[in-house]
Structure formats: structure tokens, C-alpha cells
Image (cartoon, rainbow, N blue to C red):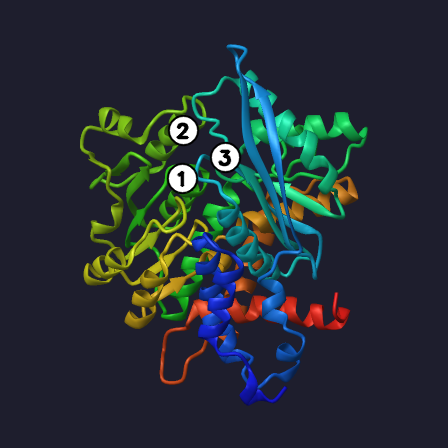
Amino acid sequence: MAVSDHVDLATFIEGVKRRNPGQPEFAQAVQEVAEDIFDFIRDKEQYHKYQILRRIAEPDRVISFRVCWEDDKGNIRVQRGWRVQNNNAIGPYKGGIRFHPSVTESVLKFLAFEQTFKNALTGLPMGGGKGGANFNPKGKSDNEVMRFCQSFMNELYRHIGADVDVPAGDIGVGAREIGYMFGQYKRLTNEFTGVLTGKGLEYGGSLIRTEATGYGATYFMQNMLATQKDEIKGKKAVISGSGNVATHAAEKVTQLGGKVLTLSDSEGFIYDPDGIDQTKINWVKDLKNKRRGRISEYVKEFTGAEFHVGKTPWSVPCELALPCATQNELTGDDARTLVGNGCIAVSEGANMPTTLEGVHVFKDAQILFAPGKAANAGGVSVSGLEMSQNSARISWKEEELQRLLVDIMAGIHASCVEYGGRPGSKVTDYVRGANIAGFKKVADAMLAFGVV
């Protein structure tokens, strides 16, 4: 095939949409990557000949299954579970399990596709996968959650393993859910193996896993600012979300001298002009992790704060923004508002939280913008380190893990800078850099295997 005969970007994306009808999140994720990859591979015939991007955008397999469980009133409930194993060219499938009513096949395919590049960027031997169910653990008793997790694992265990596919936690899946699933896996297989990450420290978990995604997104922010001879210290930051990622991003921003103004959940956001310091962050952690409350309760405890019902925090003036809630939470209009209010850097703590239009707004404004596949890779990095500890039957000290996390995030940043330079621009295109660096590692491995 001559270079001039190659399919163009529009035709490629149309093909993706035609093959995956009714899956807008997946199509969006593929388009965001393809926009950069098509330019990179234009004169690289091998990638075209072996249809590498087309193959990465077609999961190795999508497993769908019924999950039946009994609630506390004796009612039989039926949910749907999935595991999307996208690509294992550089290692076992690796990616979280999400329990949330919004979970669909499209959402999980987009997450598994993104995870493939994210995991490649870490430098660790991990492929890309994602799984979950349209089950909502909120409002459920511990026994109900246990019964659901056990039923979910009754099917999932057939498709995972320490050298095959190693799931982790995600939205709606924390230490409690991981514990129930690991216990059921152990019961079914009679094996104690590192098949899940995010486990409790008592049975093979790793220190700093809870902090890793939020800390990593903040370290990436610091690395970006350093390229402009700047830093987080003295700057105002708006953060969305109030779970592990958001609270630990807030914690690290505060430790580095920044001032966090907002946190949020699905009901709205809180704005605290005095700043959300460590004492307040600890209160939010307790609210969310132990009492499972809503962020609106913050204003009753800290009277100087405001709660804005049904809104996101992107209208609050700031220098730094860290979207840490969920996909497509930051729109094109939100991006224009942030840029207009003086925001100079955005680091995505969630997966694809910025819409494609919003990404283009940030890139056109030439502000520092770190996509989730690079900025939020801290969590899966420590998951990968947990896999290594499980394989060797050892446990590393916190100081060593903190050092490794800092080094991994610096390495990801360096890869993005290497491939994200634009002629005439002083600001790295981190989206382009992350997409190309992740793609090249996976693609070159796929070329080595031939057509499989």
C-alpha cells in the first residue's frame, strides 16, 4: 500500500463509529488518540501495513455476563458485569473495576483503550483492560455489597490471573469491595496469588496505593510548571471530586504550598475562600470513606464555605485546575471560562474528564494541559509495583514507594516532552506527547509479534 493510499482520519473515525454503534465515549477516546497518531505514522509504512491503530482500537475481547444477587429483603436482583481486555502486547491486562449505574460497555471500552496507553507510559510491563458493573454500592449494606462482589467474581475469576489479567479498584470499588472479591477468588481457585491490586496491607496490598493517583496528578502538575520555571507554591487550585483521587490531590497541592478552593460530588461543589487545608481534607476523607456522606455537609462544619447545588467548580477563578471526578465533566465552555479567569495549568486526575472540545480549547490557548493517560497514571503505577511485590512475596517501605512514584511520574513527563514538542511553541503538547509515546511502545511490541 502506498502512503498516498492510506485511510484518512475522518474515514478511520467513521469506521470506528460504524463498528461500535451507540458507544460515544469509546469513539471519543479513539478520536482523541487518532488525531495525534495519524500525523505521527503518516510516513511510517509498517504501522499502516500491519493496521496497528485499527487493531489497538479493537479490544482483544469483551466479556459480558449476568450477576445475580440477593438483597437484604430477600429480593433477587440482576445486574450486568463486563471485563474488557483491550491489549496485552506489553504485559498482562491491567485496569480497574468500576461499580456505578453509569457503567456501560462503551464506558469500559473507552477506559480500557485509554488504559493501554497509560500503562505503557509508566514503563512497567502492563497491558490495558477495564471492567465493572452497573451496580451502585451506595446505600447498600455490607452484606449486600459482599453478596454482589462474590457473585461478580463467580464469573470474573475464569478470565483473570496474575499472569493474565490483574484488576484493581475504581469508582465504587474500594478496599471493602476488593477484599470481598479477593476472598471469593481465593475460595474458588484455592490459590493465594496477586490477581487483584488495591488489596489491604494485611494480605498483599501496597503502601501509598490510596494516595498514588492524586499525588501523581499533582507531581505531574509540578513537573509541567517546572518547564516554565514556575511551581505550585502560592497558587490557587480548583479540584473536582471528593473521593480518594481528589482528596489526595488536594493534600499534595497543600503540601507543596498551593491553596485548594473547591471539592465536589454529584450534587454540587463547595467553595472555601479560606482554603481547604489538611485539617479540612481529613474531615472530608472521614465524611466520604467512613460516614459515606455528601460534600454539602462541609458547609455546616466550616461556616465560611459555600455550597453550589448542581454545579461544577470551573467558574471559580484559579491558576491551577485538577478535574478528579469522572469523564466529560469539563466542557468546552468550562475550559473557556477557566482560561478567561487566568488558569495556566490543568492536570487530569480522572479518566477523560475533559470533553474533546475542552481539550482543543486548552491546546489552542497553549496552557499547560496534562491528559489523564499521563497525569493520573500514578495509581496504576503503584498497582504495578504491588504486582511486583506480590510476585516476589515482599513488601516495600513507604519511602521507597514514594521515591518510585516520583520517578515514574517524572519519566512519564519526560516521555510526553520528547514527543509533544511543537515548532514555534514554548509549551509542550502533552496530549500529543502522551498519545505518541504510549502508542509507539505498544505498536512496536505488536510489530514484533506479527499478525496475532
What residue did someone put label 3 on? 134
Q: Quadrant of the C terminus?
A: bottom right
Give the label, 3 or 2, closer to the camera.
3
Give the label, 1 or 3, closer to the camera.
3
Residue depicted at x 36% and y 78%: 426
Q: Residues within 10 Å of mark 3 (few under 14, many from 20)?
A: some
What residue did someone put label 2 on? 288
Label pair 1/3, CB-CB below 8 angstroms: no
Q: CA distance from mark 1 to mark 2?
A: 10 Å
Q: Quadrant of the N terminus?
A: bottom right
Quadrant of the rendered image containing residue 204: top right
Disc 1 marks a residue whose amino acid type is: Thr
* Number of the label disc, if any, that sits on residue 247: 1
- Badge 1 element: helix
Q: Is residue 34 left or right of residue 194?
A: left
Label pair 1/2, CB-CB below 8 angstroms: yes
Q: CA distance from mark 1 to mark 3?
A: 25 Å
Disc 3 marks a residue whose amino acid type is: Asn
Name the one closer to the observer, 247 or 136. 136
Mark with earlier residue (3, 2):
3
Residue depicted at x 47% and y 68%: 13
Q: Is residue 193 left or right of residue 169?
A: right
Mark with earlier residue (1, 2):
1
* Number of the label disc, if any, that sits on residue 239: none
